[in-house]
Amino acid sequence: MRLAANPDGVFRYLTAGESHGPALVGILDGLPANLRLDVARIDAALAARQGGYGRGGRMAIERDAVEFLAGLRGGRTLGSPIAVVIRNRDYETPKNRALMDPLTGGGEPLTRPRPGHADYAGAMKYRHRDLRDVLERASARETAMRVCLGAICGQFLEALGIVTHSCVERIGTVEAPIDGEWDDESVAASEVRCPDAESTRRMMEEIDRAREAGDTLGGRFVVRVDGVPPGIGSNRQPDTRLDGILAGALMATQAVKAVEVGAGADVAELPGSRAHDVFLPADDGAAGAAVRRASNRAGGIEGGMSNGEPIILRVSVKPIPTLMRALPSVDLRTGEVAPATVVRSDVCVVPAASIIGEAMVRLALTGPVLEKYGGDSIEETLDNLRRSREAAERLFETTGGGA
C-alpha cells in the first residue's frame, strides 16, 4: 500500500516550526543506510544561508546548528527516518516566549496585512483573527530547515558524483555576466554570492540605496547541477517530468516568482534552428559517450529527463514584502486605512535565496535519483549506478548505432 503523500514510495521530507517558536523540525524518509554525513558541512550551509549583504537583525541573533534526533548513529545513516531540529534562539527572549509559547502564547493581535505577503490570504483561509498565526509559518525562517535537509541530500548526491552549485546573477538593476560556469571560491568570497567582483560592488551599492529609501530589492540566482546521468526523471506522466519537479520545488520557495530552465524565456524569440542543442561525434577518449552537444540551451533536460549535460536553472525572486517605509494597507479589525505591519526584516534576500534554491534542487532531485537507482544502502545504490552506466555504454556496441 502506498501513502498518498508519498506516491513513489521512495523518498519524502517534512518540515515544521514557526519563525519565533521554540525550534524548526525536519524529517527525511527514504535515504539509504550507511551514508556517512559530515555535520560540519551541514552547519556551514546553515551559516551561509544566514549571510549575505542586505540581511536584517534576525541573522545577528541566530546561530543555526543541526541536532540529530533519529536516523543517525556513529555519523552514518541507518536507513530509518532522519529527524533533525534547529533551535530558535530568538524564542528565548521574554517577549517572544510570551507571544509564541505553544501553550500560553498570546499578545495583541496583528491586523494590518502586508501587500505581497501571506498575511491576508492565510487569515481568510484559516479564519485567523491574528495575522501572526499566519506569518509565523509563512516566514522564510522556515527555509533554514530546508537548507539543513538539502545539505544532507547534497551529501547523498555527491556520493553518486552529482554536485550542485549556485550564484547570484542579478540584484535590482545590476546584472552580472554569468555564463554556464563560475568559480565557487569567487562566489564564497562575495558578500552577495556573485562571482564577478565589479558586479558585486555595484549590487552592494544598490542595496545601500534601497536601505536608505526604506525599500527592498529582488533579483535572480542560478543553480547548476553537474554529473547528473542521462535518464533521471521520466516522460511517463506530467508529474514525473524532471523539469516540472525542479521548477515546482523552486516555485514552492518564499518570494520566488519565476523559474527558467536552460535558455528559458529567451527561446520564445528563437527559431527552432537556434533553439536546440545539436549532436556532434564524441571527442576521442570520451569514455562511454557516443555523442556530445554543441550547446546546452535545453539546460540539461529534454523530454522531462536529464540528458547528461549540466542542469541550469535561473530563478527570479521578488523584493520581500516587509518594508521599513510601510506600504498602504487596511486594518482588518477597524476597516480603516493604515500602514502595513512592520516587522524586523531584510533589505535583500537574493544571496540567501541562492543557498535555499540550491537546497530545494537537492531535495527535489533526490527522489528521482532514488527512483532510478534505488537501494537500501549506499553500497547498493552505488552498485546500481555502476551497472546502469555499464549497460548504457554497451547499448549500441552490437548494433553499431542502429536498431
Image: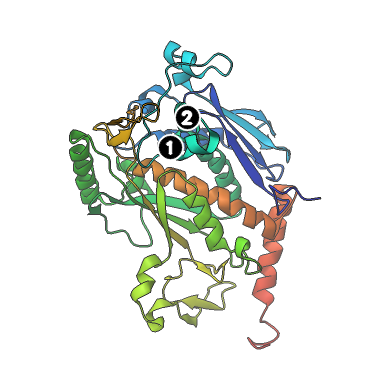
Q: What mark, if any, has residue 232 been given in the picture?
A: none
Q: Position of residue 243 (x, y in %)?
A: 53, 62
Amino acid on which disc 1 is placed:
Tyr
Q: Which residue is mark 1?
A: 120
Where 318 falls versus 124 (above or below)?
Answer: below
Q: Which residue is mark 2?
A: 136
Where 368 falls versus 131 (above or below)?
Answer: below
Q: Residue at x 42, y 13 (%)?
A: 95
Q: Are marks 2 and 1 in contact (CB under 8 Å)?
A: no
Amino acid on which disc 2 is placed:
Glu
Q: Which of 255/260 is in front? A: 255
Quarter the C terminus occupies: bottom right
| Relative side of 139 to 102, left or right | left
- Is residue 228 visible in the rendered image? The answer is no
Residue farthest toward the top in the current orientation of the protein: 94
- Pointer 1: residues within 10 angstroms few (<14), some, or many (20+)? some
